[in-house]
Each structure stands twice: as structure tokens, then as C-alpha cells.
């Protein structure tokens, strides 16, 4: 890769059937995250978030990697050379887009097509769902090169995996295969590489059929209640549903009730109501 890599080339996307496929696009550098990529990713996320033609965002990688973590040269060495202001700036640029993705307006799916290391656990966790190919590899390699798994990576490991597994993973610096990542809940499913995209497409297109406001409130509810007591969660979910009642201008729940109770055109236990029919 030349020294004149353009910021706008570090991420690319395409939109198909209301699904935005967003690519880490530094394949020659195994899609490691440089300050340029972090800035560009935030721009792309902002550009896509509120579009009416985007209901789901899939984050994947160009080439053989999903993301080889932070760029040791551009994110660590070169920013350290700028002193604390440079370090803090580059941290903010990375953490900002991961946070934006955690609370994204649309459903998000990580499609892990290859290497996923260290800092890559930030966006991995930020995505609501995650699917990987059997030949993907996941690693907290930090311990192998003299740092601890920062930038949220330790938190991600302990949030998603049992304590002993997270500890071994962080201390040993050994990689997990795709099936192991699924077994330990880093991802929802691991699939043969040639089936990965089709499965993710199927999940994304199912989500697209649903009421997007309901999906947003549901995913936020799952993330928020994890840190609440039962009583706080119960109360919060009442308020959140009441918020959704106001926010969902299509009045989805009444439309759906009519389709089930009166029209008998769908059963909630077996699928989604038809959101294109708006009669309540
Ligand atoms: N930072 C900087 N450069 C990287 C990184 C990275 N994280 N990952 C890959 N590259 C570069 C390589 O230096 C190489 O550059 P060059 O062509 O200019 O020599 C190029 O990408 C290709 O990498 P290779 O190592 O040749 O690719 P290979 O397919 O053999 O190996 C692998 C892939 C295993 C991902 C290897 O590149 C690697 O170990 N990368 C580092 C992974 C890592 O530990 N990331 C940091 C985690 S900790 C954190 O994120 C805070």
C-alpha cells in the first residue's frame, strides 16, 4: 500500500435491498484500523444511519481479514510520536465510531470473513449480531506484543464469554477458530465460508421486513437491561415501550393487532405482520 492512501478509500459500501454492506477496505493491511480508517468509518456510518433505504447494516472486510485490530504503525507508533494529544485523539476517533455503532439506529450485523484481532473486538461487540466463517480466526493478541487488551477488548471478552474462557483467551494469546467463537458466544453462528454471505443476507432481509422502530427499541433494550437490576429493568422497559408507542408513527402494534385479531392474515408466533398495510 502506498504512503498516499486516501482516507475515503479505507471504507467502502454498497446498498442492496435495504441492506448496507460496509467493508473495512485495507485488504493489503489486513484491514487493520488506522486513524484514517476510523475517521472514514464514522463518516460512512453517519451517512447511512438515517437513510430511508437502509434498514440493516452489515460490517465485513475486504480480502482475507475482517480486521487485524489496530494499526500498530499508524494507530500506535505514529500517534505516540505526537505525544499524549495524538494518542488521545486517535483513541477518540476509534471509540467514537464503535460507540456510534453500539447504539446505531438500524440493526447491525458483523460478518466476520477472516482475521479478527484485538481492537476488532470493539466493532464486533458493537454489532447486534455476528456471523463468521469457519476459517475465521479470533485473537486477543495483545499479550503477545506487550500490551493488555484495551480499547474495550477485555470488556468484550468478559461480557460475551465465561470467565475461564475469557481469562485463557486474554492470557494465552491463542486464536479461536470460527466454530470455537460460536461455541463461546463471540458470534451467533459459524458457517462454511461459501455459505456465510447467504446466511447473513437471509438474516438481514428478515430484519428489513420488520418494523424498524421496533427493532431499534428492542436492541437498545437488550443492551441496556444487562446492567440493570430486575426491578429497574421492568420499569425501564415499560417506559421504553411507551416511548416506542410515541416514536413509531406507523402505530405498528395496532396495525399488527388488527391483522391478527380481526383480519386473521398473520400469526405473531409464526412471523411478522405486513408493515406495508397500515390500517389499524
Ligand atoms: N498493524 C499494522 N500492520 C498490520 C497489521 C496491524 N495490526 N496487521 C497486518 N498488518 C500489515 C503487515 O505488517 C503487512 O504489511 P506489509 O505488507 O507492509 O509488510 C500486511 O499487513 C500484511 O500482513 P501479513 O502479516 O503479511 O499477512 P498474513 O496474512 O501473513 O498474516 C495476520 C495476517 C495474522 C493478521 C498478521 O498480519 C498479524 O499478526 N497482524 C497483527 C494482528 C494483531 O495482533 N493486531 C493487533 C491486535 S491488538 C490491538 O488491536 C490493540
Image (cartoon, rainbow, N blue to C red):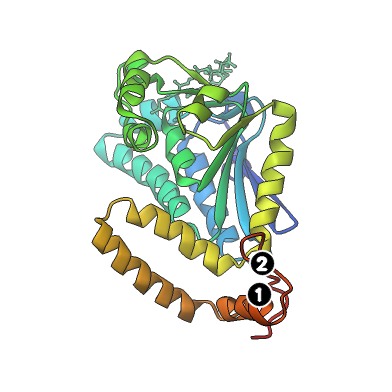
The foreground one among 270 and 60 is 270
Percent x, y of residue 144: 36, 14
Q: Residue at x 52, y 30 (%)?
A: 182
Q: Earlier in the sequence, mark 2 or mark 1?
A: 1
Provide the residue designation for mark 2.
267
Q: Are marks 2 and 1 in contact (CB under 8 Å)?
A: yes
* Residue at x 27%, y 41% (from the top left corner): 85
Which secondary structure lies at badge 2?
loop
Question: Of residues 220 and 36, which is closer to you in this image?
Answer: 220
Q: Residue at x 53, y 67 (%)?
A: 214
Cα distance in 3D space between marks 2 and 1: 6 Å
Q: Give the residue pinned by disc 1.
A: 260
Give whichever of 54, 3 is nearer the camera: 54
Measured along the vertical axis of the image, is residue 116 above or below residue 240? Answer: above
Mark 2 Cα-neighbour bin, 10 Å: few <14, some 14–19, many ≥20:
some
Residue 68 visible in the displayed image: no
| Residue 7 vertical position relative to residue 214 in the rendered view, above or below | above
Q: Split into 4 quadrants, where in the image is the C terminus?
A: bottom right
Is residue 14 depicted above or below 136 in this figure?
below
Amino acid at each position: 500500500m502506498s504512503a498516499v492512501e486516501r482516507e475515503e478509500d479505507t471504507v467502502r459500501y454498497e446498498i442492496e435491498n435495504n441492506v448496507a454492506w460496509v467493508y473495512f477496505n485495507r485488504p493489503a493491511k489486513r484491514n487493520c484500523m488506522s486513524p484514517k480508517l476510523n475517521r472514514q468509518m464514522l463518516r460512512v456510518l453517519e451517512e447511512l444511519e438515517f437513510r430511508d433505504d437502509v434498514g440493516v447494516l452489515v460490517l465485513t472486510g475486504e480480502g482475507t481479514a475482517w480486521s487485524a485490530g489496530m494499526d500498530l504503525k499508524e494507530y500506535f507508533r505514529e500517534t505516540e510520536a505526537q505525544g499524549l494529544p495524538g494518542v488521545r485523539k486517535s483513541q477518540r476517533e476509534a471509540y467514537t465510531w464503535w460507540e456510534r455503532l453500539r447504539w446505531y439506529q438500524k440493526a447491525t450485523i458483523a460478518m466476520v470473513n477472516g482475521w479478527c484481532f484485538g481492537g476488532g473486538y470493539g466493532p464486533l461487540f458493537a454489532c447486534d449480531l455476528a456471523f463468521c466463517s469457519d476459517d475465521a480466526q479470533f485473537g486477543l493478541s495483545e499479550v503477545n506484543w506487550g500490551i493488555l487488551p484495551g480499547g474495550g477488548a477485555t470488556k468484550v471478552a468478559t461480557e460475551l464469554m465465561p470467565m475461564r474462557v475469557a481469562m485463557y483467551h486474554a492470557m494465552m494469546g491463542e486464536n479461536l477458530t470460527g466454530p470455537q467463537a460460536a461455541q463461546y458466544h463471540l458470534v451467533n453462528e459459524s458457517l462454511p465460508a461459501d455459505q456465510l454471505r447467504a446466511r447473513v443476507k437471509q438474516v438481514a432481509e428478515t430484519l428489513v421486513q420488520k418494523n424498524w422502530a421496533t427493532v431499534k427499541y428492542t436492541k437498545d433494550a437488550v443492551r441496556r437491561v444487562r446492567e440493570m437490576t430486575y426491578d429497574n429493568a421492568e420499569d425501564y422497559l415499560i417506559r421504553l415501550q411507551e416511548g416506542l408507542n410515541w416514536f413509531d408513527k406507523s402505530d405498528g402494534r395496532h396495525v399488527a393487532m388488527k391483522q391478527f385479531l380481526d383480519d386473521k392474515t398473520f400469526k405473531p408466533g409464526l412471523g411478522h405482520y405486513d408493515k406495508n398495510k397500515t390500517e389499524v
